[in-house]
């Protein structure tokens, strides 16, 4: 805890050895770091998410979601992602649904217009609210705005 402001200081969230190995593989095009801040968990993704690493993406989101405590949120920042295949969006939707059943709000962060366009076209706007920054996603969650 930061004594000067009495706010929690974000800390690194440890991932499983298997997931660290998958992300660290020399052929992996997916990069990610995770943080915990109170009941919130943030995932900062980068690189590419496609059919080749869909299993790693799913595993990453599952581990991060398991670490998020209700009311969460689980914030997935994709601003560092250069490419997201359709499978990446399907995994996000699946995990959002599972999070909601546990009382955790999944919020997506992206400044890339194509992300919002794909989510809207697929009818996932109510399930995957998109925010431009992690701070705005955390603020919306803290304000009690469910985003669906």
Image (cartoon, rainbow, N blue to C red):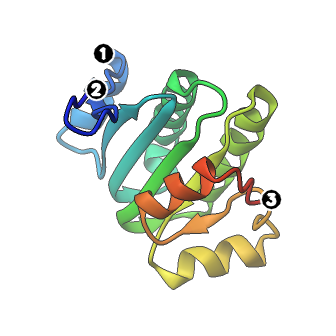
Residue at 31 percent across and 44 percent down: it is: 32
Residue 63, percent from left and from top: 50, 25
Q: Quadrant of the N terminus?
A: top left
Q: Residues within 10 Å of mark 2 (few under 14, many from 20)?
A: some
Residue 143, percent from left and from top: 64, 53
Q: Quadrant of the C terminus?
A: bottom right
Spatial CA distance of label 3 from label 2 is 32 Å
Number of callouts in the render? 3
Mark on residue 148?
3
The reply, left or right, for residue 82 in relation to residue 55 is left
* Lower sequence index among marks 3 and 2: 2
Mark on residue 17?
1
Q: Residues within 10 Å of mark 1 (few under 14, many from 20)?
A: few
Residue at 68 percent across and 35 percent down: it is: 104
* Lower sequence index among marks 3 and 1: 1
Q: Residues within 10 Å of mark 3 (few under 14, many from 20)?
A: few
Q: Secondary structure at mark 3?
A: loop
Residue at 77 percent across and 64 percent down: it is: 124
Is residue 89 shown above or below 120? above
Mark on residue 20?
2
Spatial CA distance of label 3 from label 1 is 34 Å
The answer to the question of whether label 2 and label 1 lie on touching residues, with beta carbons closer than 8 A, is yes
Mark on residue 69?
none
The reply, left or right, for residue 40 in relation to residue 36 is right
Is residue 59 shown above or below 15? below
């Amino acid at each position: 805890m930061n004594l000067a402001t009495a706010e929690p200081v974000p800390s690194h969230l440890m991932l499983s050895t298997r997931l660290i190995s998958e992300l660290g593989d020399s052929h992996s095009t997916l990069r990610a770091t995770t943080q915990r801040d109170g009941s919130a968990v943030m995932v900062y993704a980068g690189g590419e998410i496609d059919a080749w690493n869909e299993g790693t993406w799913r595993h990453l989101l599952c581990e991060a979601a398991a670490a998020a405590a209700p009311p969460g949120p689980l914030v997935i920042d994709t601003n560092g992602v250069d490419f997201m295949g359709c499978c990446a969006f399907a995994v996000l939707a699946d995990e959002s649904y599972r999070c909601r059943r546990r009382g955790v709000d999944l919020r997506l962060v992206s400044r890339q217009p194509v992300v919002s366009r794909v989510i809207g076209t697929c009818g996932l706007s109510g399930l995957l609210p998109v925010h431009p920054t992690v701070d705005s996603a955390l603020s919306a969650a803290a304000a009690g705005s469910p985003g669906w």
